[in-house]
């Protein structure tokens, strides 16, 4: 169980990345959802002991993370959002190096682990190639392999599926949910379906604040009977945005189709639809935007 | 654990072409100086044997000073590389200790730099057996002066330079600032050399030289030719004191690095200086959203010229802000300030610093670029 209390962080440039964040994260996959720049990475980096919060506490089981960073790092697997590699070193050599740093000092078990991960991330064929020649997706898979070295009990993966093709993404998400049966896996993404499909629990973060946390299904249930859909013409879109709480508009065959949040049928032509997590997500973001506008 | 950092990083360093290229160039310089009078490194050989122990040690010592700028790349690079490449987060999230990290990296950088000096030593050895070298000027070969030179000058000096560079790199996290530090160090060393001529306290003069060359010079000053051809000064007195002092300083710098190095991103700390904090709310509001309207590019006879001008400006700004340019400029300016401050004198005679003299100093200050 990862427990985060009253976490705050303001960067030197004035951006408040974390505002009084409280989270309870049990074993299993935990999704962090939020737009770009919401503070997801700041939160994950702070838990991974890579930066200090201004205030607040983090506990993982009985480890006080702020006090005993090394104990946490012994149990941690971390995949940063964007990372580099040594371009002239082979994937196998660098993975082996990381394995030693993680504490896998027995040669035989290290070899087995490294080879196994290279196979699971589909890098076996490319293991002798220099990392500088890897494509974006291959490098991402290398990062995943590196994060799973050892026996991490806390896995933090920041936008892990970015740059993966659909096949690789499925493989990786399956692997993650397998791992998540025993350990805490924290996963950030802005792909809403990943969270719906995978995560029994999640949190939504916007502008450093946790707007919602809990089970995705429970959050979706709250919107039951309140999401309405209509196909409209492009020119009418601004008017609808003015009159209703438009959650999202997407083009279907070139024509906008809008989802509106409303207690009852907004007007003729709207049909009720099954809400999904994306509706919840947009509702929270719109609410946060309008409250920010109100304070200005 | 430090051994893993050492092993991995040494392999990395030894695979850098720049290491072998610079080693080769230094070896060539050493070869030239050992085999001919046309190449002079740190003072002429004089009338002693070309491979007199004193000469070999002197060569090795002087090369530690010359090599400082190139050593910077490997020593400071070993600490700066991870942040530059963006792999630092993954490394610092492992349960490694920063002590192992710094020590392993430092030792690897040191060994890599030693490889350069092994090449230099080979250059000297090879230079003295060339067919065009007067046989009468060559004494019997002995490995002792090489070992002595490595033990007394090369290793302690690399240790000191390395410790200084790693401290700078670990605290500033900027290659430019490391180079600025190197230049300041170099200038201070030269200035100390100039002023020490006026200092009567010999101990102070000898101890003030971090490279120990002045101590060596002081102890061999009154060597006869026969002595210079066959012996080295005893490792005691001035030279022992100097080496002990500066090796101690090197260890202190390493300790300080360990204390000050934070394996976290520099922007995660508080900013002590530099740009003032601007609160996000104080930033000007973004202009109102405009819809996309395509614009037809105008391509006529003047377009190429305008593009050329813009390219020139763009690249010029890039060059003027680049680390190598700024480093060379700084070295030149430091050189000039040093030269100009002594512009009123020539061979001990007072002269007027007329324009002609100052211009000569100015152009001479930048001559290191084509030497």
Image: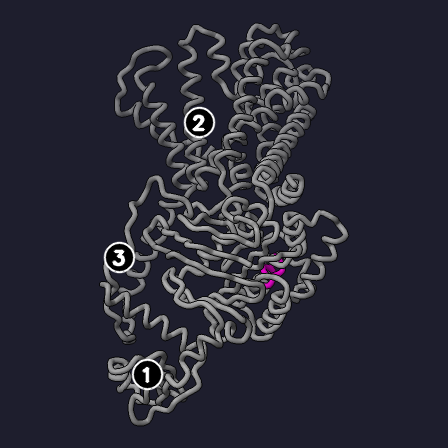
According to the picture, the residue beneath numbered tag 2 turns out to be: B185
Q: Is residue A254 above or below residue A218?
A: below
Residues at discs 3 and 1 in contact (Cβ within 8 Å): no
The alpha-carbon separation of the residues under discs 3 and 1 comes to: 32 Å
Residue under the image location 30 percent in, 88 percent down: A266
Q: Chain of mark 3?
A: B
Q: Position of residue A169 (x, y in %)?
A: 57, 71
According to the picture, the residue beneath numbered tag 3 turns out to be: B281
According to the picture, the residue beneath numbered tag 1 turns out to be: A262
Q: On the picture, is B282 further left or further right than A113?
A: left
How many tags in the picture? 3
Q: Please, which residue is most extreme toward the front here?
A: A62
Q: Is residue B24 visible?
A: no
Q: Chain of mark 2?
A: B
Q: Name the residue nearer the viewer: A252 or B183.
A: A252
Q: Is residue B253 visible?
A: yes
In this view, the mark in front (3 or 1): 1
Q: Is residue A206 magenta?
A: no
**Same-chain status of marks 3 and 1:** no
Q: On the picture, is B125 further left or further right than B158?
A: right
In this view, the mark in front (3 or 2): 3
Q: Quadrant of residue B273?
A: top left
Residues at discs 3 and 2 in contact (Cβ within 8 Å): no
């Amino acid at each position: 169980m990862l427990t985060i209390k009253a976490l705050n962080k303001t960067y030197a440039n004035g951006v408040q990345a974390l505002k009084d964040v409280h989270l309870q994260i049990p074993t299993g996959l935990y999704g962090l959802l939020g737009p770009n720049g919401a503070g997801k990475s700041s939160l994950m980096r702070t838990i991974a002991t890579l930066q200090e919060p201004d205030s607040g506490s983090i506990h993982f089981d009985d480890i006080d993370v702020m006090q005993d960073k090394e104990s946490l790092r012994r149990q941690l697997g971390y995949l940063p959002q964007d990372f580099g590699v040594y371009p002239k070193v082979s994937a196998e050599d660098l993975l082996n190096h990381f394995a030693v740093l993680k504490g896998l000092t027995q040669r035989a078990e290290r070899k087995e682990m490294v080879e196994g991960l290279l196979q699971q991330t589909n890098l076996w064929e490319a293991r002798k190639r220099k990392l500088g020649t890897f494509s974006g997706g291959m490098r991402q898979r290398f990062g995943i392999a590196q994060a799973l070295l050892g026996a991490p009990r806390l896995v933090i993966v920041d936008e892990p599926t970015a740059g993966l093709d659909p096949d690789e993404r499925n493989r990786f998400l399956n692997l993650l949910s397998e791992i998540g049966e025993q350990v805490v896996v924290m996963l950030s993404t802005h792909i809403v379906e990943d969270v719906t499909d995978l995560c029994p629990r999640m949190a939504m973060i916007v502008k450093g604040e946790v707007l919602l946390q809990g089970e995705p299904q429970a959050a979706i249930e709250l919107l039951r009977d309140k999401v309405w859909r209509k196909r409209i013409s492009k020119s009418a879109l601004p008017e609808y945005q003015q009159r209703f709480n438009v959650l999202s508009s997407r083009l279907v065959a070139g024509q906008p189709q809008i989802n509106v949040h409303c207690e009852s049928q907004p007007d003729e032509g709207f049909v009720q639809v099954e809400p999904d997590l994306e509706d919840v997500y947009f509702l929270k973001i719109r609410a946060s935007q309008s409250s920010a506008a109100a304070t200005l | 654990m430090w051994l893993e950092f050492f092993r991995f990083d040494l392999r990395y360093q030894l695979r850098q072409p720049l290491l072998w290229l610079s080693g080769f160039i230094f070896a060539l310089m050493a070869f030239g100086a050992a085999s001919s009078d046309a190449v002079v490194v740190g003072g002429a050989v004089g009338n002693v044997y070309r491979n007199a122990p004193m000469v070999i040690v002197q060569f090795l010592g002087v090369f530690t000073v010359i090599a400082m700028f190139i050593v910077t790349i490997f020593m400071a690079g070993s600490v700066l590389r991870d942040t530059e490449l963006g792999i630092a987060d993954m490394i610092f999230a492992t349960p490694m200790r920063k002590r192992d990290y710094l020590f392993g990296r430092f030792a690897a950088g040191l060994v890599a730099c030693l490889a350069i000096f092994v090449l230099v030593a080979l250059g000297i050895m090879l230079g003295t057996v060339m067919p065009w070298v007067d046989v009468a000027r060559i004494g019997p070969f002995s490995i002792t002066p090489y070992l002595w030179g490595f033990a007394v000058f090369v290793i302690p000096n690399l240790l000191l330079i390395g410790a200084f560079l790693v401290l700078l790199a670990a605290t500033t996290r900027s290659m430019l600032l490391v180079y600025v530090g190197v230049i300041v160090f170099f200038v201070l060393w030269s200035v100390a050399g100039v002023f020490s001529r006026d200092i009567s306290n010999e101990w102070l003069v000898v101890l003030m030289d971090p490279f120990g060359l002045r101590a060596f010079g002081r102890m061999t000053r009154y060597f006869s030719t026969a002595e210079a051809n066959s012996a080295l000064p005893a490792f005691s007195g001035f030279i022992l004191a100097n080496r002990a002092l500066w090796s101690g300083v090197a260890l202190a710098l390493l300790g300080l690095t360990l204390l000050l190095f934070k394996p976290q991103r520099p922007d995660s700390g508080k900013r002590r200086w530099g740009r003032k904090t601007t609160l996000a709310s104080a930033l000007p509001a973004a202009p109102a959203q405009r819809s996309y309207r395509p614009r037809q590019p105008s391509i006529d006879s003047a377009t190429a010229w305008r593009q050329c001008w813009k390219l020139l400006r763009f690249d010029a700004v890039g060059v003027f802000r680049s680390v190598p340019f700024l480093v060379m400029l700084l070295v030149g300016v430091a050189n000039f300030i040093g030269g100009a401050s002594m512009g009123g004198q020539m061979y001990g005679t007072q002269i007027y610093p007329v324009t002609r003299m100052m211009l000569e100093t100015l152009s001479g200050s930048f001559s290191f670029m084509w030497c």
